[in-house]
Image (tube, rainbow, N blue to C red):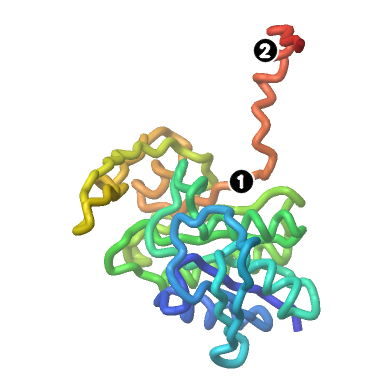
Amino acid sequence: MAKILVTNDDGVHSPGLEVLRKHLKKLGDVIVVVPEREMSTASHSLTLRSPLRVSRIKKGIFITSGTPSDCINIGTLGILKEKPVLVVSGINRGPNLGDDITYSGTVAASIESTLRGIPSFAISVASFKNCRFNLAAKFAFILARYILKNGLPSHTFLNVNVPNVSIRSIQGVEITHQGKRIYKENLVKRTDPRGRTYYWLGGDEPTGEIEEGTDFAAVARKKISITPVQLDLTDYKMIDKLRNWHIKFP
C-alpha cells in the first residue's frame, strides 16, 4: 500500500492532526511524524547540533524533539522503508498567507519534502479560533487524490488556505499567487528580577493586501486558495539589471 507521510508544526496535540490522518487513510497507509511540541514559525530550520529523539506513541504515529523539517528527514530516511508518494503538512491552526510562508514551519515541511523529490502540499485553516478542521481535511483528501493522479513539478509544492466557514458558505476553489502580508511588529523591552534586560517580540494581528488574484483575496471571498510555490527564488528580471552594474572586484 502506498505510503503517505503527514506532519505539522502545531505538535502532536493539534486537533487538526487526527482528523487529517483519518481522511487520508482512505488513500493509503498514513504515517505521522510530528514535533512533540508546537514549532510554529520554526521556518526551514534543521537540528544539527543536538541529537533528535523519536518516540512511537501508537501504531503509525511518531513524535520527535525536532522541527517540522526534521520530521520529514526522520520520516523519509529513518522510519519509512520506502519513499512516500505524498507528504501533507497540516492542518495548521491559523493562515499561511502571503509572506507568512517564509516563517511557517508547516510550509517548511513541504519545502523539505520537495527538496527530497516528494510531492507535497501544506494546508491551513485561515483562523486561530474555532477552526473547522473537518472541512479542511475533506478538501485535503480531494486535493491529495488530484496530486496522486496528476503529479507536481519536481520543484513545486502547493500552499493551501481554507476559509474558516461552513461547507455551504465555501464559494469554490481559486488558484492564486502569493499576496503581501502587512506585519505590525512591536518590541517590548523589560527587566527581569535580577536586573537583566529581556525582550518580547509581538504586535497586533497582521493584515494583508486584498489584491485581485492573491491568496488573501480568495480567502476574503470565502474561496479555498491554492498557491503553487516553487523553490527557485531567483529574481530573473534583476539578472540583466545587475549585469549592467558591471560590478568588479578588486
Residue 92 locus on image (x, y percent): 44, 64
Residue 91 locus on image (x, y percent): 47, 67
Residue that appears at 39% across and 49% down: 219
Drawn side of residue 181 relative to residue 74, left or right: left
Up-down: is 220 above or below 248? below
Residue that appears at 44% across and 60% down: 40
Q: The C terminus is located in which quarter?
A: top right
Q: Are marks 1 and 2 in contact (CB under 8 Å)?
A: no
Q: Secondary structure at mark 2?
A: helix
Residue that appears at 34% across and 39% down: 183
**Structural distance between the alpha carbons of marks 1 and 2:** 25 Å
Front of the two marks 1 and 2: 2
Between 29 and 163, which is closer to the camera in this rendering?
29
Instruction: Give the number of marks.
Output: 2
The answer to which image quadrant residue 110 occupies is bottom right
* Residue located farthest toward the front when viewing the structure as drawn: 194
Up-down: is 143 above or below 20? above
Between 224 and 112, which is closer to the camera in this rendering?
112
Drawn side of residue 178 relative to residue 239, left or right: left
The answer to which image quadrant residue 56 occupies is bottom right
* Residue located farthest toward the bottom when viewing the structure as drawn: 58
The answer to which image quadrant residue 249 occupies is top right
- Residue for badge 2: 241
Drawn side of residue 8 relative to residue 212, left or right: right
Between 36 and 140, which is closer to the camera in this rendering?
36
Q: What is the crowding at mark 1: few (fewer than 14 residues within 10 Å), some, or many (at least 20)? A: some
Residue that appears at 42% across and 79% down: 13
Q: What is the crowding at mark 2: few (fewer than 14 residues within 10 Å), some, or many (at least 20)? A: few
- Residue for badge 1: 229
